[in-house]
Image: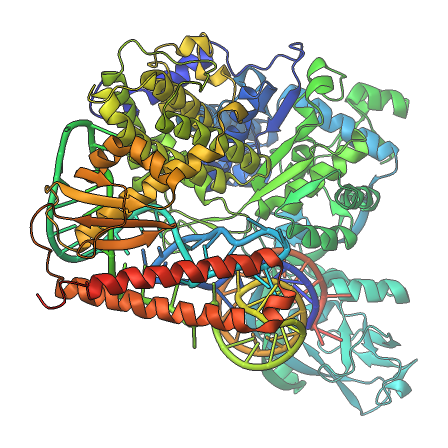
Amino acid sequence: MDKRFDPRSYEAAWQQRWAERGYFRADPRSGKPPFCLMIPPPNVTGKLHMGHALQTTLQDLLTRWKRMQGFEALYLPGTDHAGIATQLMVERQLREEGIQRRCLGRERFLERMWEWKGRYHGSIRRQLDLLGASCDWSRERFTLDEGLSRAVREAFVRLYHEGLIHRGEYLVNWSPILETAVSDLEVESRTVHGHLWHVAYPIEGSDERVVVATTRPETMLGDTAVAFHPDDERYRHLAGRHAVLPLVGRRLPFVPDPAVDPEFGSGLVKVTPFHDPFDFELARRHGLPGVTVIDRHGRMSPEAGAEFAGRDRFEAREGVVKRLVEEGLLVKVEDHVHNVGHSQRGGEPIEPLVSTQWFCDVSGMAARALEATRGGDLRLIPESWEKTWEHWLEGIRPWCISRQLWWGHQIPAWYDEEGRVWVAHDVEAAAALAGTTPERLTQDPDVLDTWFSSALWPFSTLGWPEETEDLRTFYPTDVLVTGFDILFFWVARMVMMGVQLTDRVPFHTVHLTGLVRDAEGVKMSKTKGNVIDPEDLVEEYGADAVRFTLASLDSPGRDVPINREQMTGYRAFGNKIWNATRFALSRLEGAEVQPALDTAGLAAPERWILSRLSRTAGEVGEKLEAFRFDEACHRLYHFFWGELCDWYIELAKPAMFGDAPRPRVGEVLLTVLDRSFRLLHPVMPFLTEELWQRLPGHERIHPETIVLAPYPGREAQWEDETVEEQVGTLIDVVTRVRALRAESGMPAKAEVAVWATKDPETDRFLAEQAPLIRFLCRAEALHLAPPPPDARQDLVEGVAVGVALPSAAAQELGEEERRRLEKELEKLDEAIGQAERRLGDEGFTAKAPPQVVAGNRARLAEMKERRERILATLEPIGTAGG
RNA sequence: AGGCCCGUAGCUCAGUUGGUUAGAGCGCUACGUUGACAUCGUAGAGGUCAGCGGUUCAAGUCCGCUCGGGCCUACCA
């Protein structure tokens, strides 16, 4: 076995072999219980970032764990066409060639899109392979492939006929840069330092003027009314009268409306129905007309008047202000901080615009999604997200699902020559409905929001609407692992579409991961230049170390800071595992891994490590069940390094070297390694397979691969509380002896004399283990008696421990050692005082549970005895004078 | 504006239903080992558990308020 631990020497090879042998291919007919998990489809042309690496790690960990537990595990991979994002990329590329999308035409543009997609497509798989993802690539899907497109059409048609999708003219969030409508979720509000302009509007038939305040003067060109609160005494008299819109001359009725806040500004609101959601609603209540003064490019429209038509909306703002100044109508300008909706993708301020779009009424589905979490059919982890979830679903509004893009699922709606709309799976079906021929129909040019197809992902990927074997077997899926940032974009919509279209909640658990940050806790972003590429990390540390790091950082509700030092530490863990195995294999000829192992006749260290192993397996299982991957990792790390390597292998050395043979040490060690590798496999798949294959007898666990070997659970017959306690005492004694000899400056190479005693039973055990204790302490003798006064001594877990250089005169107490002991004594005195006070308090002794009181008493007694030991060391009797 | 989460060692974080002298990993310092190991052993420095108040025999843990950080949601022109 190579002395050098080099993950690159085996990782890729294993991934390839696993795939070739079809270990990841799920079989719906196996009869095993299914476990299914869907990849959140990354952008087909994208590069995986650390967030993906984190999610992939957890998804794969779950899948491998379930697969080993005997589930028919399906980890279904795929990619998303990511409408706007991808189209923008290709448009940018075209621009570099000097080509405009519209000049190219829809068909040729889409050809370019598919070309682009084809070029990048393999990259996602390559990156997932690097991480060791155990995806079933035979089931890979793409949101625009034929099957999924069919599912999308089916969903649309069905929802349309159920009256849940309709087309209508509403005020929508318009992105002038993207030239498309976007949903509420794609609008993010940003704090903007703007101004509040106070403008005087003359009152018709009077010399009076009223003052209105606005943050967007350019929209006044589209005003159709002025509103005030009905109880506002200042303006009540204006009801029924009109203002005259400056620069335009339009008559604006004064309307009373309770939505107006009389405290804000002058208490009067200019009403621009077609460019402000508040005004749109208000106008609707009062039957007021609207005027569109800004167009789809964010420029002023002809209806804004000849002076402004064609000018950019922000330029027009300045122009309008300038004109108002000239007219003497600008009363004052104030600085004003407010929130303005911006296009998430385009980055520019959203323009509320009246436009004809398709909407999906999700209120009923939202109610069912709420039922799912309230009734326990769906669990969000961490639970704290449930409130946000409820709040969002309770206040949900219709979802604008049409986009004025080309890259995506074109809406399955056709218009006849009379402009009537026919919704069907294809043009032939539409023509049949319309009673006409396909040639006379025109398909709606819009495409669906990317998230519409994503919402169907858990079942469309399994063949829905067909009742396929896969769908029957694997749907509903089990767990969804994704980032909280797409809880509403994606998760909520999958749940809504799932209950609506399949009558099932698409998964029972959603594990939401935190955001991956850099070592300083700063969000990774290209502009900050702190982005870490998962591929680089895999190259540097190996996939197993990357996975272990990510999994061990996944604490609920926490962000995930990537720390290279930590990753170095976990690579060292891999190295530790490598070398421990190398050592074991070099010293244990003839021994084999045991499928089962009888502890009868084994010595204490062997029984101890087997007991610890069983408990560790039990705890790891519990942690995984609870989605506490971090704690599962910590347990495994501690077991392997802290118990197996630090103690068991050390305890086994005298036996392995033949100095003090014990029965079946090799069998035990190899068996423990086997179980350890299997426990670790879901987190560190490569290393564990590589090493497991080298264990003699591993084929008795599984003939081919650790991937399919059973996941270890508790092996209760190995658990032995007594031996754990005994070996625990042995470890305490050895640790204390080492501490005492190091503190007192005894030469490390010196063979010392050791004393240890507690009670007859413990002493008997320590006597049995005397050779081991002497080996671990480098002691020439172990005396089962109280330490003599001139020995360095202490009390640990009730055991009086002492150590001294043999024969030679008592060692002088060093200055440093004295200081340490005095400090310890001080702390001890304080703790003793505290414990005495507590035990002297009747409130405590009367009200606290008896076992707590008893525990305190025992502790106090032990502390007092330790105090005596320390005093004895500080002022040994008999040496005081000498 | 409403809601949620977070604030514990230099760093990253654990701390289950309140109950030892508040822990782990990594890092740092010192000494010492190394006959599987990029090891290992021992010790040390470093904490008013953000702050204030309350409940309780007992609070890092429960309650209220304040401060700081983050996020989600929202039609105040």
As drawn, A476 above or below A549: above
Q: Position of residue B60 (x, y in %)?
A: 53, 65
Instruction: Out of A426 and A244, give the one closest to the viewer.
Output: A426
Q: Is residue A403 visible?
A: no
**Which residue, as the protein is rendered here, is positioned at the far right?**
A240
The part of the image, by quadrant, that contains residue A245 is: bottom right
As drawn, A126 above or below A398: above
Q: Position of residue B6 (x, y in %)?
A: 52, 60
Which quadrant of the figure contains the N terminus of chain A?
Answer: top left
The part of the image, by quadrant, that contains residue A212 is: bottom right
Residue shown at 38% from the left, 63% from the top:
A864
Q: Is residue A716 visible?
A: yes
- Number of numbered discs: 0
Q: Position of residue A111 (x, y in %)?
A: 54, 25
Instruction: Out of A614 and A91, give the one closest to the viewer.
Output: A614
Residue shown at 19% from the left, 65% from the top:
A818
Question: In the drawing, does residue A699 fall left or right of residue A146?
Answer: left
